[in-house]
Image: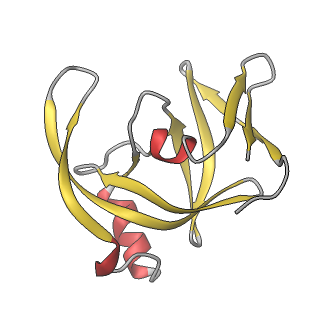
């Protein structure tokens, strides 16, 4: 666990009023949408295959499927797993719950990762995500 107050500022990339952030899962680096309204991290089936091929996720990482309510109100069932490590800046967060989107779903950073931090804020002027452990 962390000792004392540790913070990191991570540059966000804005496109079409959406913030994106580069995240590394194991050794696989991807650009994710920062979505504080999403309950979990969401990876695509393509990213899942890359993580399997890299040996980052294994059968033991999988959880029971769950139902998720989308922004349009529809409900879908998604497969779920625990991601062993996610790195944002200098922070490495372990055992983060994620769901797997169908097809080429958007990659989302949701509350299952953000809630692992004591505090997080977005500086809209400088487009910086501040994370505090």
Q: Is residue 46 left or right of residue 24?
A: left
Q: Residue at x 22, y 50 (%)?
A: 102
* Image x and y of residue 68, in percent: 22, 38
Q: Position of residue 11 (x, y in %)?
A: 75, 38
Task: Tell me residue 115's x, y (percent).
Answer: 54, 41
Q: Determine which quarter of the picture holds residue 91.
A: bottom right
60 shown above or below 19: below
Q: Quadrant of the N terminus?
A: bottom right
- Is residue 37 something that shows in the picture? yes
Taking 8 as reference, is 111 left or right? Answer: left
Out of 58 and 104, give the one closest to the viewer.
Answer: 58
Residue drawn at x 41%, y 71% as measured from the top left: 50
Q: Is residue 73 left or right of residue 109?
A: left
Any part of residue 109 in sight: no
Residue drawn 38% across the image and 54% down it: 98
Q: Residue drawn 80% across and 45% down?
A: 8
Q: How was this image coloured?
A: secondary structure
């Amino acid at each position: 666990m962390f000792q004392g107050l540790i913070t990191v500022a991570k540059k966000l990339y804005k496109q079409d009023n959406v913030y994106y952030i580069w995240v590394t899962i194991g050794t696989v680096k991807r650009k994710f949408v920062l979505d504080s309204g999403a309950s979990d991290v969401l990876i695509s089936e393509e990213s899942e295959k890359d993580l399997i091929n890299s040996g980052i996720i294994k059968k033991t990482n999988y959880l029971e499927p769950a139902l998720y309510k989308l922004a349009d109100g529809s409900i879908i069932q998604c497969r779920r797993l625990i991601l062993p490590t996610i790195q944002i800046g200098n922070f490495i967060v372990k055992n983060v719950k994620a769901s797997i989107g169908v097809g080429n779903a958007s990659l989302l950073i949701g509350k299952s990762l953000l809630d692992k931090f004591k505090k997080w804020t977005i500086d809209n002027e400088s487009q910086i995500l501040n994370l505090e452990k």
